[in-house]
Image: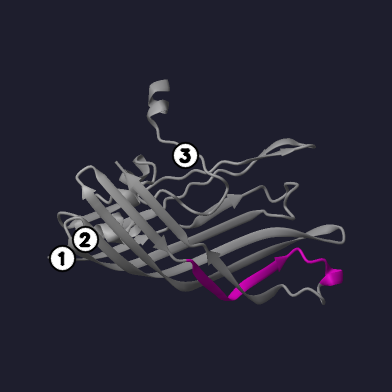
């Protein structure tokens, strides 16, 4: 049993929303893949490496993410976040036409899910939050010679977000739910150099994406009768998700 547990992969990241599990091989190599570029996931990690692949490639997969968090309360001791399971997808394909390579990437590089008991002491900060994004990236790459290639991709992102929290009103809580969806655009650039058989140097840049959430739905429940004329049960809102840019440089020997 202990041996089986030791063989299970486990990662520990800060409580952010970037998902660093976008390829099985890349994950096994510590996400250094922009300097390796040896399978179809290079469409995402470094489009410059597509041009130096030896053949057409296609991969489809997912990972299982079960986040855990605990709040140490001075009053109630440890308060655990509710268990959830997420399965971000990865779909990559590369097709070679002489010195030109075309590729497609579909994945979920950003996402977040956290859910707490509705009555926990931090309910005025958060009860539940869920963020999901889909990146669709058509990409082209050109091989200058057998040691150097560069590539670029267009990114279309669609995303949705749900936020739930409580607000204190007189002697009871008002439950607030915000739901919105939208889309945005970005790009991906990459250069890959392989000066010798066992040395790969990769530099890639993925731009930030601003996802506009237009005409989202805000719902309030539990409004006291004394405030019913002041607080609407439903309303519309506009906001945005600012997904960060990412730059990666690796020299792999």
**Labelled pair 2, 1 in contact (Cβ < 8 Å):** yes
- Which residue corresponds to mark 3? 11
Report the residue marked by disc 1. Answer: 99
Above or below, 5 against 16 in this view is above
| Extreme residue in the left direction | 98
Q: Quadrant of residue 186?
A: bottom left
Mark 3 in CB contact with mark 1 (< 8 angstroms) = no
Mark in front: 3 vs 2:
2
Give the residues drawn in magenta, as a range.
208-227
Residue 253 pos. (x, y %): 29, 41
Judge left or right: residue 222 versus residue 182: right
Find numbered disc 2 in the image and state the secondary structure of the residue it sits on: helix
Q: Judge the density around disc 2: few (<14), some (14-19), many (≥20) Cα neighbours within 10 Å.
A: many
> Disc 3 to disc 1, how far (Cα)?
38 Å
Secondary structure under tag 3 reads loop
* x then y, percent, for residue 140: 26, 68
| Quadrant, the N terminus | top left
Q: Nearer the viewer, residue 247 or 92?
A: 247
Q: CA distance from mark 2 to mark 1?
A: 7 Å
Q: Which residue is mark 2?
A: 51
Q: Residue furthest front?
A: 195
Secondary structure found at label 1: loop
Upstream in sequence: badge 2 or badge 1: 2
């Amino acid at each position: 049993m202990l041996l089986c547990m030791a063989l299970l992969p486990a990662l520990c990241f800060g409580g952010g929303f970037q998902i660093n599990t976008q390829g099985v091989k890349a994950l096994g190599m510590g996400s250094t893949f922009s300097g390796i570029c040896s399978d179809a996931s290079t469409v995402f990690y470094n489009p410059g490496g597509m041009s130096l692949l030896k053949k057409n490639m296609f991969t489809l997969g997912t990972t299982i993410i079960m986040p855990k968090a605990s709040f140490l309360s001075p009053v109630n001791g440890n308060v655990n976040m509710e268990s959830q399971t997420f399965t971000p997808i990865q779909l990559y394909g590369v097709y070679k036409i002489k010195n030109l390579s075309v590729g497609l990437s579909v994945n979920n590089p950003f996402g977040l899910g956290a859910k707490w008991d509705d009555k926990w002491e931090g309910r005025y900060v958060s009860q539940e939050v869920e963020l999901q994004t889909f990146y669709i990236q058509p990409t082209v790459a050109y091989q200058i010679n057998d040691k150097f290639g560069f590539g670029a991709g267009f990114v279309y992102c669609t995303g949705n977000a749900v936020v739930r929290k409580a607000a204190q009103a007189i002697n009871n809580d008002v439950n607030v739910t915000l739901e919105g969806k939208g889309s945005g655009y970005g790009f991906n650039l990459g250069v890959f150099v392989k000066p010798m058989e066992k040395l790969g140097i990769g530099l890639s840049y993925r731009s930030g994406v601003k996802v506009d959430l237009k005409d989202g739905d805000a719902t309030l429940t539990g409004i006291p009768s004394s405030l019913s004329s002041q607080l609407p049960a439903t309303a519309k809102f506009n906001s945005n998700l600012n997904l960060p840019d990412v730059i990666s440089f690796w020299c792999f020997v």
